[in-house]
Amino acid sequence: MKTTEKVIGTGIGLAALAAIGTYFLYGKNGEKNREAIRGWTLKMKGEILEKIEDLKEIKKEDYYKLVDEVAARYERLEKVGAEDLKRLTKDLKGAWEHMNKELR
């Protein structure tokens, strides 16, 4: 992979994270989401970002699959509440439309 392709891929990944973060923190449930932020939520989003950066193209199905895979790992952690995880997963999937607009 050429350096230019890596830079573009990283830029796309960062734009995706910014879009997800903006939607999560300032979207329709933003105030409630900001109150519920915990360390694991940020780690989970970071893992999703890292996996997005490895993709050449981001399709809705691929994005949903990544969110589900990472959520499944966090589901097994004791410190992660089922309701919080369900809400975060729903919010991350709901951010797809916003993120897709930002990437275009």
Image: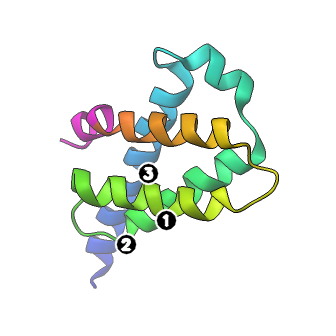
Asked if the stretch drawn in magenta spans residue 99, the answer is yes
Rounded to the nearest whole Å, what is the CA distance between mark 1 and mark 2? 7 Å
Q: Residues within 10 Å of mark 3 (few under 14, many from 20)?
A: some
Q: Which amino acid does label 1 sit on?
A: Glu
- Element assignment for label 1: helix
Q: Mark 2 points at which residue?
A: 54
Q: Mark 1 points at which residue?
A: 50
| Alpha carbons under labels 3 and 1: distance apart | 9 Å
The quadrant holding residue 44 is bottom right
Measured from the top left, where is residue 100 in percent x and y? 24, 40
Q: Is residue 22 left or right of residue 78?
A: left
Disc 1 crowd, CA 10 A, few/some/many (<14, 14-19, 20+): some
- 64 versus 96 height, above or below: below
**What residue span does the magenta drawing correspond to?**
97-104
Q: Residue at x 66, y 55 (%)?
A: 43
Q: Where is residue 56 in the image (x, y as percent from the top left)?
A: 24, 69
Relative to 79, 103 lies left or right: left
Q: Say few, some or many: other residues with alpha carbon within 10 Å of mark 2 (under 14 / 14 to 19 / 20 or more).
A: few
Residue 54: give x, y in percent of width and height: 37, 72
Q: Is residue 45 above or below residue 65?
A: above
Q: Check residue 14 in the rendering and tell me which mark sits there, or answer none.
A: 3
Q: Split into 4 quadrants, where in the image is the N terminus?
A: bottom left
Q: Which of marks 2 and 3 is nearer the N terminus?
A: 3
Indicate the quadrant containing the C terminus: top left, top right, bottom left or bottom right: top left
What residue sits 38% from the left and 45% below the top? 15
User: Whole-percent x and y of residue 62?
Assistant: 28, 60
